[in-house]
Image (tube, helix red, strand yellow):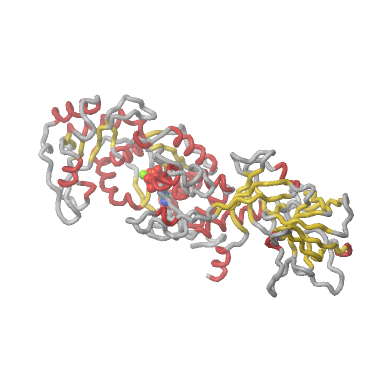
Amino acid sequence: MTNETTPAPNFIRNQVREEIEGGQVTSIVTRFPPEPNGFLHIGHAKSICLNFGLAEQMGGDCHLRFDDTNPAKEEQAYIDAIKEDVSWLGFEWAGPVRFASDYFDQLYAWAQHLIREGKAYVDDLSPDEIREYRGTLTEPGTPSPYRERNAEENLDLLARMRDGEFGESEKVLRAKIDMASPNINLRDPILYRIRHATHHQTGDKWKIYPSYDFAHGQSDAIEGVTHSICTLEFEDHRPLYEWFLDNLPVPCKPRQIEFSRLNLNYTLTSKRKLKLLVDKGIVDGWDDPRMPTVSGMRRRGYTPASIRKFCDMIGVTRADGGLVDIAMLTHAIRSDLEDSAPRSMCVLKPLKVVLTNVPEGHEEVYEVLGHPARDDMPVRRVPFTRELYIDRDDFMEEPPKKFFRLAPGREVRLRNSYVIRCDDVIKDESGEITALHCSVDFDTLGKNPEGRKVKGVIHWVSAVHGVPLEVRLYDNLFLEEQPDKDKDADFLEHLNPESLNVCQAIGEPSLAHATPESRFQFERVGYFCADRHASTPEHLVFNRTVGLKDTWAKIKQKG
Ligand code: ATP
Ligand code: MG
């Protein structure tokens, strides 16, 4: 954990710095290797900030390489979205966008090399038999009866697999390592599977596809990657990663370093589960503002800087299983928008106020700072008229003692304007409050006359000049801190039914020109962003990015 002034621990950065200072490495190459089977989420953002950040800070290159070895689950649309997200986060990959599939010819040649060396064989066991023969954590595996095939036969079978002569689960190519290894990953791992699928990059050229393990380290080596950074679940794969590099004529030997993945409370960081939310129509696509995807956070109003800052704050360690508080993420965006978002007034639940001592047609316009601490932002022109809207929540007919807003007979200040007093509550036949009749104390513009204590200040919008806005109030998608904690239960049971509430709000006139993705602080309410898809000048739509209350800042103060 950290605060803004002391950087969080990042053991990989420290290690790389030592290597550079000690002369073991001159320049580094890292890579970010997403599989294009979904959109990127906040966990990927951590990996992106780490890999691209290292290259930036240490003077090196970071590649963007799609790990596209499973054509059945991958799509061009995901590739496009991932590229857009990485760029939006503010990073630039070195050289072209790369694909593991660029190396399929080389990988095939290396598979042939292993066969010739007696280190790989074609196995005819079925997937179930392979699993049975593999053994368990406590029992060694059993060698396949096909393990001793000669090189010539293996080369021939592999070529025929490639050309589509066999069905999908008839044969695989396996490395011949050690069926009794205590590390199950070394018990003759699969190098190639038959897949009769069309690949988004290579079309119908291949009927076999390399496994993740066979493709990953070698792709790193081909690209001259120095530090291959991945999450802790790959720690047990490292001996295999190194076995390939030791047993193949690769141009260089990258080093795999693992770190712990990001888990965020009230959130899922698994593409598979996020895809389910999309496929079931529970959310409005991968970039629904409630999704923890990079594009969802973007639509919600997060800035690239806030996501990068959050990734800095959480640091990089090998401590597994920790859950990061989402309040830390909202703190990062809040503190960014606090400085950068222009202010404005918007009433989410409008309640009409008639100022009975203001003449019909009367109008005054206040020039108000765009931001209280910045004079570079345009001044807003805020019109004041006889009829206004205030928020329903700022009025109570029978207020408790500590309610400092409007109530019958009580006074409150209209932000940037006069003190008003509530004289009358107007109701319809059903008893519903439809309007308040209030009177203005004209002696109170910009000052409190002597002896008068008016504690409450509320926001308001002129009923004549206000602009209608659709405002979407988002909350966490899940009610449980760890929605997928119980592996046997359905995480969908923990969905928050109140994760989206829509209101028809009224905003001050300066909001009429809000362009998609522009961000504002609605004073006293929160930070909002004009929806990048839905908001038009005719129909303004704002998403609530985050409220004003910063629980993380409080936790930090106490801690
Ligand atoms: P998911 O489980 O969501 O499908 P993945 O690990 O399968 O994620 P990849 O596309 O393979 O997704 O991930 C690309 C890179 O991002 C990998 O290096 C992976 O380790 C890293 N990554 C994925 N999830 C996280 C996370 N929660 N925290 C940190 N890094 C992550
Ligand atoms: Mg993966």
Residue 154 appears in view: yes
Residue at x 14%, y 51% (from the top left corner): 140
Q: Quadrant of ligand 2?
A: top left
Q: Residue at x 22, y 30 (%)?
A: 167
Can residue 227 be seen in the rendering of this structure? no
Q: Is residue 90 above or below residue 447?
A: above
Residue 135 is left or right of residue 280, and the answer is left
Residue 511 in percent (x, y) is at 71, 46
Find residue 347 and report its image quarter.
bottom right
> What residue sits 54% from the left and 67% below the top?
555
Q: Along the horizontal axis of the image, is 388 left or right of 279?
A: right
Determine whether 350 is above or below 212 in the image: below
Quarter of the rendering containing residue 419: bottom right
Indicate left or right for 196 with 324 as reference. left
- Horizontal relation, residue 86 to residue 405: left or right: left
Foreground residue among 99 and 411: 411
Q: Nearer the viewer, residue 495 or 383?
A: 495
Residue 551 x %, y %? 56, 64
| Residue furthest front in the image | 429
Rendered location of residue 137, percent (x, y): 20, 55
Number of residue marks: 0
Query: Which x, y percent locates residue 382?
Result: 79, 51
Of residues 526 and 25, which is closer to you in this image? 526
Q: Residue at x 35, y 53 (%)?
A: 232
